[in-house]
Amino acid sequence: MKGGLKVSQISLILIGFVCASVLLLAYVKSLFLSSSVLPQNHVLQLSPDLRVKDEEALGEGSGSEQSEDSVNFESEKYPTYANSSPMIKVTEELITQEIGGIAPNITEKGDLKDVSDKKTGLIEQEIDVATAVSSGGEHSENFTATPERQDCNFAKGRWVIDDSRPLYSGFGCKQWLSSMWACRLTQRTDFEYEKLRWRPKNCEMEEFSGVKFLKRMQNKTLAFIGDSLGRQQFQSLMCMITGGKDRPNVLDVGHEYGLVQSRGSARPDGWAFRFPDTKTTILYYWSASLCDLTPINPSDPATDYSMHLDRPPAFLSDFLPSFDVLVLNTGHHWNRGKLKANRWVMYVGGVPNTNRKIATIGGAKNFTIHSIVNWVNSQLPKYPHVKAFYRTISPRHFFNGDWNTGGTCDNTTPLSEGKEVLQDESSDYDAARAVRGTDVKLLDITALSQLRDEGHISRYSIKATPGVQDCLHWCLPGVPDTWNEILFAQI
Ligand SMILES: *[C@@H]1O[C@H](CO)[C@@H](O)[C@H](O)[C@H]1NC(C)=O
Ligand SMILES: *[C@@H]1O[C@H](CO)[C@@H](O)[C@H](O)[C@H]1NC(C)=O
Ligand SMILES: *[C@@H]1O[C@H](CO)[C@@H](O)[C@H](O)[C@H]1NC(C)=O
Ligand SMILES: *[C@@H]1O[C@H](CO)[C@@H](O)[C@H](O)[C@H]1NC(C)=O
């Protein structure tokens, strides 16, 4: 009797122990997986598998010299850092600690399931891509969910190979495509990444067509407002609509929006083009912070700028009524270095910010995203024709360092980190939370772009500094084309 009890006790303990181990293992796996889906490279660096892989690919890390041009791939309107690298290092360390906003708790429901799916999925990957392509896609799957457009989560799905891609040639589209982003014009030799198409899981995504796009957007205006990743999406869309062919009849209507190059500046604040047959206008306005900037002392050329975290850019409030589709984004200018270099000072309620929660970079960014989304949402009842989207953050892929410490992204094998997005939630928690309960839609591209570390400009940028890679911007044609396909499916 007593001996029997002992045995069952031991069995219980053993079972308990096994369960605990399994749970612990799953939890640890979920940490690694989730970190590989998160957009910030600081987080990515935490993942040992990624690090090992990258070291293998690179051999020896290239100990690179710091140079000032290296610091800012987006040398757009404002100067790059004028300061010496020690300062930059310090500020970047600060950023590492402060940018927590995007990646809060990993243990959201569903993650454990994702791990197991992903593990098995990896083994089948080769075959799976092949069958998906040869069968033309959908047949092998059974859609239990009704494939209605509203119910679609376009962010969930997988990358497949499609020989009908890309939608335009990277040798063409000279009318709109910046040569620095046209990887076909660089030293790059692998172009497999151009053949990938995104296939949402539970819904059909309408095939993009320039003709259909223009027809749907007849007499209408689409505006991108955001940082240089927004500009990439703008250029991508212009190339997609035209198939990369010259369109001499497309009108430059920048002047209608005050988008003219002022004396002494390298380029205007944006561009606006109109397709005359359908009177479709596509424009881009450069607002890296997505908030209103005003000089603190207008008569001083070296003035600081108030960065009004709670006010939309003046351009947006001026022109919103004339837009039909609006796509907002921000993200990569939220770091101490850029704020300092641009002489931006955080303001809330028209006075310098004193709220310590907002004063951190992550806090300020989150506050701004919420503010702008709420403001746009408050305007929609007045302008019901406006469809507004907030585009989630475009992930960076600096491995073994950051943009200023020799970080690299020279993997050329597509989808080496997986090809599927299984999660229901966006990886950009700030953005997802901001649009919740509003009529602003989320253009969620974070997790699907996270799988595309091979798609960046990498070390092939035209004005490349040795040892410095652009793991922020994308080759075009490339990943931003997919963002536009998902956008097209929703307008
Ligand atoms: C993450 O989870 C832990 C424990 O479950 C909790 O203490 C912490 O507040 C959470 N953090 C966030 C940002 O939600
Ligand atoms: C697929 O769906 C059909 C009906 O919609 C059903 O009869 C069939 O059993 C399903 N197959 C699988 C494998 O779930
Ligand atoms: C576009 O505007 C023109 C007049 O400017 C009008 O005749 C035409 O019907 C409009 N088309 C659509 C689809 O709104
Ligand atoms: C982001 O900002 C909103 C609105 O200000 C706030 O409710 C939310 O708690 C913030 N999120 C984080 C993670 O601080």
Image: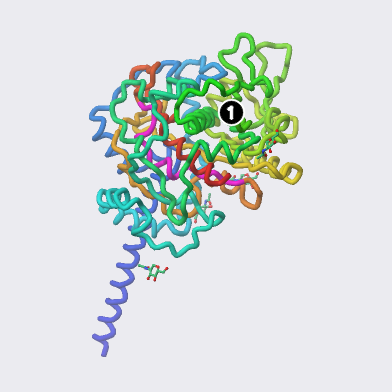
Range covered by the magenta-colored residues: 441-458
Left or right of 9? Residue 296 is right
Q: Number of labelled discs?
A: 1
Residue 72 counted in the magenta span: no
Q: Residue at 35%, 33% (x, y): give it.
A: 399
Bin the neighbour count of mark 1 within 10 Å (Cα to Cα): few under 14, some 14-19, many 20 and up. Answer: some
Where does the N terminus fall, quadrant-wise? bottom left
Residue underneath mark 1? 275
Quadrant of ligand 4: it is: top right
Q: Secondary structure at mark 1?
A: strand
Looking at the image, is 131 positioned above or below residue 351?
Answer: below
Asked if residue 84 is positioned above or below residue 124 in the image, the reply reads: above
Residue type for callout 1: Phe
Residue 95, horizontal then vertical, whole percent: 50, 32
Task: Compare residues 389 and 15 and report the one nearer the observer.
Answer: 389
* Furthest residue in direction bottom, as rendered: 1
Residue at position x 39%, y 60% in the image: 113
Give the image quarter of residue 52.
top left
Compared to residue 4, the image places residue 45 above or below, namely above
Does the magenta segment cover residue 446? yes
Q: Is residue 3 left or right of residue 450?
A: left
**Image color mode:** rainbow
- Does residue 401 appear to the left or right of 308 in the view shown? left
- Residue 23 spot, x, y in % from top left: 36, 62
Percent from the top left, x then y, of residue 450?
Answer: 41, 41
